Every structure is written in C-alpha cells, then in structure tokens.
Amino acid sequence: MGLFVAKDEADVTSREEMLVEAGSPEGIERESGRTLLMEWGGNEDVAPSVGLRFETCETVSSPDGNVIKFRVIRPDNDDTVACVYYIHGGAMMYMSSFTANFRAWGRMIASYGVCVVLVEFRNAIYPSAVPEVAPYPAGLNDCLSGLTWLHANAERLHIDPTRVVVAGESGGANLAIASAFSLKRQGELDLIKGMYVLCPFLAGMWTDGTYPSSIENNGILINVQNNRAAMAYGIEAYQARDPFAWPAFATKDDVAGLPPTVVSVHECDPLRDEGIAFYRLLLSAGVAARGREVLGTMHFTEMLPVLCPEISRDTARDIAAFAIS
C-alpha cells in the first residue's frame, strides 16, 4: 500500500527488496512526495496553536532498548484532562506524526479539551522521527512502551489515567487494535478506557475479493492490490494468521472483553469493508461498539485537515468527546 502509487504497483519477493527500493532514487522521490503532501496538509489557519501547550518527549522502548518520541499537545492550563493516545498511519511502514498534517490534526483534537499524545514508533521501511526501521512486532512494542510511559507521566502531564483512549488511522488503527489485544493478554486492559479506530488497515492482503471495497475503490489515493504490506510488516505473521499483526484474522474470542470502541470508515476507501467487518465482529462478541461512515470521503481524509477542514473538525470533536465521556 502507498500514497501516490500506480494502480498496478507490482508485488515484491521480500522485505529486503522493499528496503533496497526505498533507498533508490525512485524510492527517495516517492518518500519526498509523501512528505510534501503531509507538510501541505496542515497549517495554523485550519488548526491554530492558540490556547494549547506543546512538549516533545522521549523514552526507551522495551524490549529492544531503542528510543521512541512523543509530541504532547494539550490545553494551556493545568487541568487534569482525558487523553487521546494517537498512533499515526502509513501501513506501519512509513510516515511520521511530526509532519505538519499530523501536528494540525493533533491540535484539532486537543482544541476540544483533551491531551493528545502522538507516538513515534519504528516504521517497517521508511524511518519516522525515530531513525530505526524494523518489521513486526517492533512498532507494536514501541506503541505499548509508549502507553507505559504515558501512565508513568500522567500526573506530570495532568492526564486522567482512567480516561485514556488509544486511537489511530489506517496502519495506526491496526496498531491501536493490536495494542488492545496485547493489553488484554497481559491483563492490563484497564490502561485504556476505549479505542477509536479510523479507516483501519487490517487484512494484510486484499487480492481474494473478501472485501469488495478493496477492488471497487482501489487506486483512490492508495493501492492495496499487491503483497507489499504483508511483506513489509511481516509475511511470516501474515502466513501464521496472527491477529496481533493483522487484526482481520481476529476471532470473537480475540475481541471479547475489549473496551468500548468506535470504528470510523470512509465511503470511497479501499479499506472501508474490512473496517465494517471488524465493527460487526466486535458487536458479535458483545463489545460496546459504534460504527461511523463518512460519506463522500477517501482514505485518510481527516488527516489532511486543509483538504476538508469541516470533516476533520467533526471527527476530531467526536474523538475528544469519546475520550471525555
């Protein structure tokens, strides 16, 4: 999967092939194009900084000992507030929450009275604001380490530890769900009060027609009709049908007991139908879930706030209200 890609983007034979491609002139040019889009996608006009406070932090991730970073955005006061722990998208292989679009998106959410913690984790192919790249489960481990850091620093950050929502879009939604699975396995689901997942990127491969939107909407911003996502993040985990890597493989037992969850999808997104399927799986397992479809929109719409600011604001308001409730 990628942004600004040809609809017939070819399969690859390995993650190593993708790393070589990423370092080629063509790969560097593609990444530059993505970065230009992200820097265009947010500014002070659509999401002002006034009334907000900012901090950049870092911690050591477990078990690998690498350093991860955070961008903390909150109201400029010392009130104890709910928190949105936000995981950026990019198919778990590229993008950074430190670019202008995500900074604006974080400001939008925080403007409704919550603290937003944007976590920078290890991508699988192209570096984020942390320099290392690594496949599954590196990014997941980093996100879990970030949650541990958040709770350890909740008092200093004036965050209510009983009102922490883990959220993310696309690959970040994958990691948010996988984080909840991991917390459940560890007996630590009380670290989060809910999940808010947008345009979730869950299946790993989309070539068998299981999700019709992956064919009907393919080529609208993203291309999923290839094996690149599974190869980049972890083909072994895909072949093992590991729901911690690819939550589309999750069963009712896997999701049973998860906290309240909102699943938001876009009408014109190749990933629309897997998001709807995951929402229905949650309902079948007795999870308090709410589904939301944003009509007329493509994948990633809200994360480019200059594109449709009124839609971004509406979703940002809903995320903040969910965290506060």
Image (cartoon, helix red, strand yellow):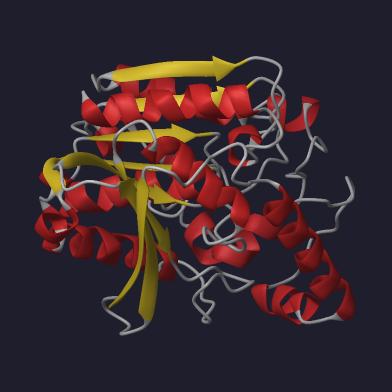
Residue at image coords 62%, 63%: 94
User: Among all residues in the image, which is located at the extreme front?
Assistant: 50
Above or below residue 142? Residue 215 is above
Q: Answer with left or right where residue 149 lies relative to residue 14.
A: left
In which quadrant of the rendered view does residue 45 lie?
top right
Relative image position of residue 108 (x, y in whole percent): 47, 37
Q: Is residue 197 visible?
A: yes
Relative image position of residue 251 (x, y in whole percent): 35, 34
In which quadrant of the rendered view does residue 69 lie?
bottom left
Above or below residue 121? Residue 4 is above
Q: Can residue 1 be seen in this view?
A: no
Q: Which of 315 and 187 is in front in this view?
A: 315
Q: Answer with left or right where residue 200 lies relative to residue 156.
A: right
User: Among all residues in the image, which is located at the extreme bottom?
Assistant: 65
Count of number-bearing discs: 0
Residue at image coords 84%, 81%: 24
Q: Answer with left or right where residue 256 lies relative to residue 295.
A: left
Q: Nearer the viewer, residue 138 or 73?
A: 73
Q: Which of 138 and 90 is in front in this view?
A: 90
- Quarter of the image where the C terminus is located: top left
Q: Answer with left or right where residue 239 lies relative to residue 13.
A: left
Relative image position of residue 137 (x, y in whole percent): 41, 67
Residue at image coords 85%, 58%: 10
Relative image position of residue 119 (x, y in whole percent): 40, 60
Residue at image coords 71%, 29%: 298
